[in-house]
Image (tube, rainbow, N blue to C red):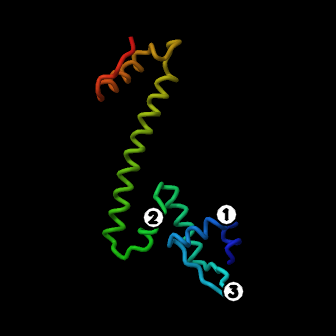
Amino acid sequence: MTIGEIASRFGLATHVLRHWESAGLLAPARVVAGRRRYRSADLYRVATILRAKETGLSLEQIRELMTSAVPARRREILLRHREDLVARIDALRDSLAFIDGGLECEHEDFTACPHYQAMVRARIGSQAAPHVPT
């Protein structure tokens, strides 16, 4: 496949594939006149890169995962990223609880809701005392 064909197949701009190549993520075959030719294995590689990017991995992390010959190093990268994802998921769940609390409140002003006030008190208690304007 040509660079245009593979880019179109994944909804990418051709410069993205060139960038991934310069970053060491792709190594398409070259034919006459230096034109890139992508093989079926490259399809899987592009799909893997896209999926890894969706998880939040950086291109550097993806390159290291795809090129490292040391299984323990690949596992270390994945474990560290997993920990980061778990922390982000926890923070998003807290955010969702805050939003749901505001939506479920029957008070005209959700800041007067006892549940909301309890969440704010918990936040104040978990940090240094805030400056309260007078």
**Neighbours of disc 2 within 10 Å: few (<14), some (14-19), many (20+):** few
From the viewer's side, name the closer residue of 13 and 41: 13
In the depicted structure, whether residue 41 falls above or below residue 47: below
**Neighbours of disc 3 within 10 Å: few (<14), some (14-19), many (20+):** few
Q: How many labels does the image show?
A: 3
Disc 2 or 3, which lies upstream in sequence? 3
Tag 3, which secondary structure? helix
Quadrant of the rendered structure where residue 92 is?
Answer: top left
CA gap, disc 2 to disc 1? 20 Å
CA gap, disc 1 to disc 3? 22 Å
Tag 2, which secondary structure? helix
State the image coordinates of residue 70 (x, y, percent, origin top left).
33, 74
Q: Which amino acid is tagged 3?
A: Ala
State the image coordinates of residue 130 (x, y, percent, origin top left).
33, 22
Mark number for residue 33?
Answer: 3
Quadrant of the rendered structure where residue 129 is?
Answer: top left
Residue of label 1: 13
Q: Residue at x 49, y 28 (%)?
A: 99
Q: Residue at x 37, y 76 (%)?
A: 69
Q: Which residue is drawn at 47% across and 59% down?
A: 58
Q: Which amino acid is tagged 1?
A: Ala
CA gap, disc 2 to disc 3? 30 Å
Question: On the rendered structure, is 74 left or right of 15?
Answer: left
Q: Which residue is drawn at 38% across and 22% down?
A: 120
Tag 1, which secondary structure? loop
State the image coordinates of residue 66 (x, y, percent, origin top left).
45, 71
From the viewer's side, name the closer residue of 97 and 58: 58
Question: On the rendered structure, is 90 left or right of 59?
Answer: left
From the viewer's side, name the closer residue of 63 and 40: 63
Residue of label 2: 60
Disc 2 or 1, which lies upstream in sequence? 1
**Neighbours of disc 1 within 10 Å: few (<14), some (14-19), many (20+):** few
